[in-house]
């Protein structure tokens, strides 16, 4: 997941006035009221702390739509009062954009305001916790921007909040410009911040989100379906796993005592830890999943064999299978404790393996949901909505809609696994974790292989041509397509020249640079280096600014150059648009379930043991060829 590099917050009404026919128009605005905002790129609401908002100058640029080249004017006064950020200023630039803002505003156009600046410090408040900011109390989850520098303010023409409104003073009026008391706000638009500040912020956000996810999963693991009210209370109020376990132990009734004289604990959790430990999970992973008391109890069982483990879970000795293991299996599964325990272990280890596989495909593919196994159609609306001059009669023309159709279909992928008679005789406890973990690896590989096989196969689409084709303006070859400054410039131009079906510009920039492992260092240098060192014909070094710094998110995978895939290459590279805007590839999951499911099944009559089945329902399909560009990287 990635987050905005630079925040711009659309706010509430802007008021314009000119004191004379040739006078410079003025404006007065309330830019932010201190509350929650839904911000693109952030998974939860955002609040900016006024005390940490640094106002770099009383005179900062005023722009249109945050574009540096679309100058409008400057501020003459900026202040924070009554928990509102207010600004006054002049539309002082002699530009087309300044004239548009002034003329439109004084004629009644409802301009909105938007502030922008780099994030210097931020905090994530998880669910169940509270934080006080700007004199208001907010409940998590919420992102709090603790420090931010105000660098510019822009006029914008649209807001996500339908309650926002604005009135504009006509020209030649001299009365005071009113100050709005509205408290509405709208969505921000992202821009770009150079440096490592946002990278550190993103790491903080991801770390906090991961910590919150681990907290919830650990609590649910401890509860194991019991005491659901206590579990819900712990999750909502932000309890730590240790605190929840203490309450759980106090309220739980005593369970069956294992053969060894140990203090009573939630034995299923301890037994899970024993199996995970036998499966080779690292101490770091174990410490994140289980509390210290559980790990201490599990450590005392280190080296236990499979049969003894099952006896502990069963709560009493099981008959030995001197001549027939069926008696042992039937006795072991005579209660629900052992089957439920093994199902829980299988789920956790399957997910462990599933998450281990390279999932870089998630960065370039749109993740979608389907509700059945039938073929589904995806319709992308391509329209002609350019404003036309209105005739004397005032009649407006109708915009034209056309559809582009893409398909998607989910299928089921799965495998059976279980505890066989051979495993029982071998008495190997690690089998309980090794087998489902390998199944999880297989589930991850199934999706990963399908995505990269599809991309590298360059499938034929509805027009009878390959997905990446020169006629589609999304494929180039030749020596000039090598990944360097010139090659990336060539690709950028080609991507920006992509057109809609009506021949007009698509107008959508690329956001992702996809490369094989061999080009990862080159790609990262192109995105991070601010200067380029070159040599003149006289071998005198010169330094030029890197025009591509920070433009694209680098995604690298070894699958692109792996010889096991047809058409693999260590030189070819790609540009992708944001997959949520123009998806080139789509991965759809049945019911939105994007991780494998484990179910216990009765063993086949000819199988001495018990079985589980792991399955995942998904489909992978190419979508709009305009969303990606391939550069061969060689002649």
Image: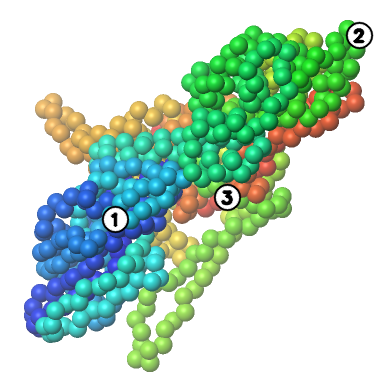
Q: CA distance from mark 3 to mark 2?
A: 53 Å
Give the farthest residue toward the bottom.
393
The residue that label 3 is drawn on is: 368
Q: Residue at x 20, y 53 (%)?
A: 150
Locate residue 95, reporting x and y percent.
Answer: 16, 67
Residue 400 shown left or right of residue 201 in the figure: right
Kindly indicate the quadrant of the structure image that contains residue 329. top right
Residue toward you, 273 or 507:
273
Which residue is depicted at the point 51% across and 45% down? 236
Q: Are marks 1 and 3 in contact (CB under 8 Å)?
A: no
Whichever of labels 2 and 1 marks the residue nearer the N terminus, that label is: 1
Give the residue pinned by disc 2: 323
Coloration mode:
rainbow
Q: Observer-nearest residue: 400 or 372?
A: 372
Q: Is residue 250 left or right of residue 607?
A: left
Would you say 249 lies left or right of 254 here? left
Labels 3 and 2 touching (C-beta < 8 A): no
Examine the rendered structure and indicate whether residue 313 appears above or below residue 150.
above
From the top left corner, tell me how far across and down residue 440 is, in percent: 63, 29
**Residue 496 visible somewhere in the drawing:** no
CB atoms at circles 2 and 1 under 8 Å apart?
no
At numbered mark 3, what does the secondary structure look like: helix, strand or loop? strand
User: Could you tell me which secondary element the residue under label 1 belongs to?
Assistant: loop
Residue placed at 62% from the left, 38% from the top? 595
Q: Which residue is mark 1?
A: 135
Circle 1 residues within 10 Å: few <14, some 14–19, many ≥20: few
- Badge nearest the viewer, 2 or 1: 1
Locate residue 262: give its quadrant: top right
Q: Residue 281, how many percent across, how many down?
A: 56, 19
The residue at the point 76 percent across, 16 percent down is 311
In the picture, the quarter occupied by the C terminus is top left
């Amino acid at each position: 997941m990635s987050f905005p590099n630079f925040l711009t917050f659309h706010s509430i009404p802007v008021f314009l006035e000119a004191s004379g026919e040739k006078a410079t128009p003025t404006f007065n605005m309330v830019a932010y009221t201190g509350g929650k905002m839904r911000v693109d790129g952030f998974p939860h609401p955002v609040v900016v702390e006024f005390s940490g908002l640094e106002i770099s100058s009383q005179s900062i640029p005023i722009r249109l739509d945050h574009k540096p080249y679309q100058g409008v004017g400057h501020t003459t006064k900026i202040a924070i009062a009554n928990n509102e950020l207010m600004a006054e200023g002049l539309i002082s630039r002699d530009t087309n954009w300044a004239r548009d803002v002034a003329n439109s505003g004084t004629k009644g156009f409802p301009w909105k305001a938007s502030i922008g600046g780099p994030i210097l410090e931020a905090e994530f408040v998880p669910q169940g916790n509270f934080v006080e900011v700007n004199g208001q109390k907010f409940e998590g989850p919420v992102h709090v921007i603790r420090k931010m520098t105000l660098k510019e303010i822009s006029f914008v023409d649209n807001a996500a909040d339908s309650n926002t409104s604005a009135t504009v003073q006509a020209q030649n009026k001299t009365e005071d410009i009113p100050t709005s008391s509205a408290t509405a706000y709208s969505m921000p638009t992202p821009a770009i911040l150079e440096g490592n500040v946002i990278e550190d912020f993103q790491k903080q956000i991801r770390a906090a989100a991961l910590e919150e996810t681990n907290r919830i999963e650990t609590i649910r693991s401890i509860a194991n379906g019991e005491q659901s009210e206590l579990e819900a209370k712990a999750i909502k109020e932000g309890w730590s796993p240790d605190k929840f376990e203490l309450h759980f132990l106090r309220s739980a009734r005593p369970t069956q005592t294992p053969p060894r004289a140990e203090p009573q604990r939630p034995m299923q959790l301890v037994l899970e830890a024993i199996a995970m430990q036998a499966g080779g999970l690292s101490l770091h992973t174990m410490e994140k999943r289980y509390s210290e008391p559980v790990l201490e109890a599990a450590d005392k069982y280190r080296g236990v064999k499979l049969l003894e483990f099952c006896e502990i879970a069963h709560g009493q000795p099981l008959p030995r299978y001197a001549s027939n293991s069926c008696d042992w299996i039937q006795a072991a599964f005579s209660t629900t404790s052992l089957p439920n325990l093994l199902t829980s272990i299988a789920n956790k280890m399957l997910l462990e393996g599933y998450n281990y596989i390279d999932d870089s495909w998630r960065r370039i593919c749109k993740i979608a949901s389907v509700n059945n196994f039938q073929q589904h159609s995806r319709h992308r609306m391509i329209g002609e909505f350019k404003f036309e001059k209105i005739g004397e009669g005032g009649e407006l023309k109708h915009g034209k809609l056309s559809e582009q159709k893409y398909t998607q279909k989910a299928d089921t992928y799965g495998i059976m696994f279980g505890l066989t008679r051979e495993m029982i005789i071998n008495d190997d406890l690690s089998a309980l974790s090794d087998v489902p973990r390998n199944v999880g690896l297989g589930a991850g590989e199934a999706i990963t292989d399908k995505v990269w096989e599809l991309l590298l196969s360059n499938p034929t689409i509805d027009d009878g041509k390959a997905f990446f084709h020169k006629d589609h303006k999304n494929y180039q070859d030749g020596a000039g397509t090598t990944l360097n400054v010139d090659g990336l410039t060539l690709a950028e131009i080609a991507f920006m020249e992509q057109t809609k079906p009506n021949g007009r510009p698509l107008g959508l920039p690329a956001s992702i640079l996809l490369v094989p492992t061999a080009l990862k260092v080159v790609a990262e240098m192109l995105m991070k280096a601010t200067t380029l060192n070159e040599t003149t014909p006289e071998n005198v070094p010169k330094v030029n600014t890197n025009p591509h710094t920070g433009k694209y998110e680098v995604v690298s995978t070894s699958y692109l150059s792996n010889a096991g895939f047809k058409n693999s290459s260590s030189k070819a590279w790609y540009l992708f648009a944001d997959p949520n805007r123009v998806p080139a590839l789509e991965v759809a999951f049945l019911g939105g379930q994007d991780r494998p499911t484990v179910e216990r099944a009765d063993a086949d009559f000819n199988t001495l043991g018990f079985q589980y089945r792991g399955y995942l329902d998904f489909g992978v399909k190419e979508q709009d060829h305009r969303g990606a560009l391939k550069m061969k990287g060689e002649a």
